[in-house]
Amino acid sequence: MSHVCRSRSRDWSKVAPFLRPSGSVFLWRWHSLTQFIQTQSLAVWPDRLVTPRWRHRVNVENLPALLALKVEGVPMVMATLHTQSATLFRYILRSHGIPAATFVLNAEGHDKKTSRRDALLDEQVGLVGTPNLFDIRELRAAMRFLRSGGCLIIACDTRPAQRLMVRTPQGGFTMALGPLRMARSTGATVFPAIVFHEQQWRVTVHIGNPLNIPEAARGGDVSVFQSACEEFTHSVLPIIAKYPAQMDPAHVHSWSPC
């Protein structure tokens, strides 16, 4: 819950207006904290996501398309954002038999309890031995995982060296290019995706249409990704604007006032 508490000291003037607390700040924090607690409660027992009782509480958009790509062995990249429910993403995809792993900058915060939770679910869906997590030090292993037909979940609201700005009426979004570059190198299909609570104890995974990834540019010109960044932003923006309190306060720095 520390990331929720840190929102108290955040300089919200540097964040796009539509993501700033509106009305009662107390209620805004309470709503954000409630979503976080629900997420953590579900993450404690991810193996329950395969049961009918819990499966009907999770709606995965475009699931048939993902399952078809899985059968064909096509690598997939889920370009996503940090929401209060983001930690459920890997569990939800794996509960449907999709070999999904999360790519993070630093995996030191993932303890043995997380590994045990992964093991509980993997035994239920036949994914024992399939990687669950990669960090930046395991980039080559993550690329091999993708090429073998895996699905990699990568956040776009981090602060790597290479980023591009997308301007919208609501504000500017600075998008990390890691998911797009990895997809281009491996031939993966990239989906814009975001996880959020639509109702109490009901989670929706928005999976948009695949992004158009350009061919390699001469001299490493990253501007060729501008169109794909705009496609991603326009896919997730309506959901963010509808549920702003569900964004992780520790990562809203990617959205700035225009």
Image (tube, grey):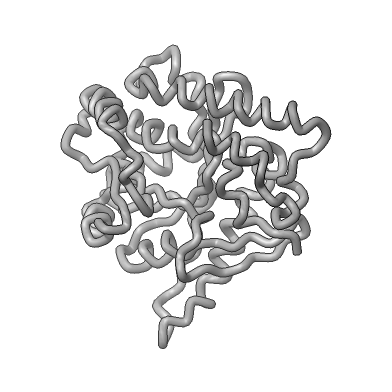
- Residue drawn at point x = 51 percent, y = 46 percent: 193
Q: Position of residue 226 (x, y in %)?
A: 57, 71
The outermost residue toward the front is 9
Q: Is residue 65 left or right of residue 192?
A: left
Q: Position of residue 238 (x, y in %)?
A: 69, 46
Name which residue lies at 46% across and 25% down: 40
Q: Is residue 243 left or right of residue 97?
A: right
Residue farthest to the bottom, as pictured:
219
Q: Quadrant of the C terminus?
A: bottom right
Give the percent coordinates (x, y) of residue 189.
Answer: 40, 56
Question: In the depicted view, which residue is nearer to us: 98 or 159?
Answer: 159
Q: Position of residue 134 (x, y in %)?
A: 29, 49
Residue lying furthest left: 129
Residue 153 seen in this snapshot: yes
Nearer to us in this view, 1 or 222: 1
Is residue 158 left or right of 247 when viewed as pictured? left
